[in-house]
Image: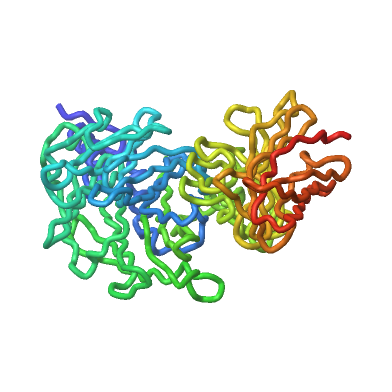
Amino acid sequence: MEKYYRANIIEEDFIELINEVTKSRIDKYGNIHEKLANRLDEESKEYSVLQSPVSYYTTINLPQGDIMQGFYFTKDAKFLFAVVAKKEEAGAEETYTLYRLSPTGNILDKMIMKNCGHGTVLAIEENKGEVYFWSDVPTGIKGKRLVRFKYKPNVIYYPSSSELEKYDNFGDTEVVYPVINDNYIILCRKTPSSWQAEKRFLVDVKSGKDEIISSIEIPVNLYWMQGITADSDYLYWLSGDTNGEKLPMLISRFRFSTGKMDVQLPLNYGEGTGGEAEGNYKEPEGLFLYQDERGAKSLFVGVVTGSYIDRNNKVFAYHSEENFVKFLGLKSQDIPKNPQVMQQKAITGPDGRWLFYVRAGSKIFDTLENFKGLATIYCEPGVLDSPSSDTSCRILANIQDVGIGNLINIDWKNRMWFTSIIKSNGALLPWQRVSTLGTSDTDWMNLQLLNGARLAWSYTPQYRQVNNRLQLKGSVIRGTSDIIGNLPVTHRPLRQVRLPVVGDGSLNTGRMTISTNGEIVINFNGLEAVWIDCEIDLNI
């Protein structure tokens, strides 16, 4: 006997209706949505973010002169990651640094992938609250190997590191650039004669299963690849060389369902206010499709401009309406890099950490040459004009005007302070030891020589303070003036002091005068060079 329901629907029809509704939750890509409404909502957004107007988002504050290769947001937009590559040794594989930054581009920490390649394209994966990256590393035999690793600040990984999860079924080509989009992973492979993007299930790759869902052949005129990202059925491809000299700068969109390109836009933004790129340099670098938990999307595009020593790592975005408001809120917290017009209002980044980050081999002065205001600075070990060049340090900068101001630092032992004045000739004056906490004693410090005066007989002119007594030592050859040096404020006598000085092996004497303004004047009296060894009481 047939069962009838209201509106005369029999049981068999009712079951078929349920099945039909269930099947309708599956979209054309095989994704099962929780509700039919979710599927329809998702398809309504399929117009592509490229239809949105492009807008400037931020400039990533990387170490001076560095060019980003790619960048990646976490889903909650709490962190932004950026990659910088360096060729450290001739004949060796490149090394890339993965920086973790605030969402507006201020450095928090980093990890180094030593000899692991250029880091051109990585895939970011969030798993149980942890951030993982996928990359390719050299195998030492042929091609590249696909790897996965957890982001860990302040560590160095090598291609052989046990912390790298290795997937050997997916390598053996020149590159294996990965991109992750929800449950899928895109592996973009390059051989000498082709580029192919393969779409696979992420779970298959993790289990070692070598199965391609669909693939796209990239046209030869787009081989100068600068960034890859993916969104459901779409693959976005950024291409073009510096200033578009050989190949134009383009964003191309392909569909896995057809294997064809359906949209292509010129990258015609990124220049300065005058209509030209800063330093006459412009290159696309990095592409990332961001999607939050609501499904709101943004396509971020990297554009680098500026001279070799002053790169501007700019980020632009095609936002959905929801994300435009979201990232505008984040952008409002941004602190401009090297502001030239406005007075700096904050001494730290929006996250409370340092405002500027100076990398080993770079200079503090170069970072601050266009800066005005207060700022905190973090220096890596090896910064060329750092007071603690063998260790990291933090510095407070107080710049009254461009090229005029001072810097204060406490060293890694938490016991010494330094100060330095920025000069307009592109350098810092020598760092001076101000005091030791709890005592007036200082270590030996090099005397700042002036007017062409220089050391004689390999004995460097130096000074130090022991209690209230100033000690000088070393030898000096006269320059263009009798004024051979200057002492810092904390090491000057209360009254002018005159002392005899002698030459090497000579009975002749000259006269050294140390003034209350710190000036050291030597009357050489016919001597070419003199010893300045002496000790004076600063308080008499």
The location of residue 448, given as percent across then percent down, is 66, 49
Q: Position of residue 144 (x, y in %)?
A: 17, 45
Nearest the viewer among 414 and 2 is 414
Q: Position of residue 7 (x, y in %)?
A: 30, 39
Residue 167 percent location from the top left of the image? 17, 36
Q: Residue at x 36, y 56 (%)?
A: 286
Q: Is residue 36 visible?
A: yes
Is 278 displayed left or right of 181 in the figure?
Answer: right
**Is residue 226 placed above or below 124 in the rendered structure?**
below
Evaluate whether residue 9 shows in this view.
no
For residue 264, what is the image quadrant?
A: bottom left
Q: Going by the picture, which residue comes out furthest to the top? A: 438
Q: Residue at x 23, y 51 (%)?
A: 91
- Which residue is at 42% across, 41% downward? 74
In the image, what residue occupies the spot 17% across and 34% down? 12
Q: Work out whether residue 126 or residue 244 is closer to the camera in this orientation and state it.
A: 244
Question: Front-most of 219 and 167?
Answer: 167
Number of labels in the image equals 0
Q: Quadrant of the N terminus?
A: top left
The picture quadrant where one finds residue 183 is top left
Q: Residue furthest front?
A: 507
From the viewer's perspective, tell me whether residue 232 is left or right of residue 472.
Answer: left
Residue 282 horizontal side relative to residue 352, left or right: left
Image quarter where the C terminus lies is: top right
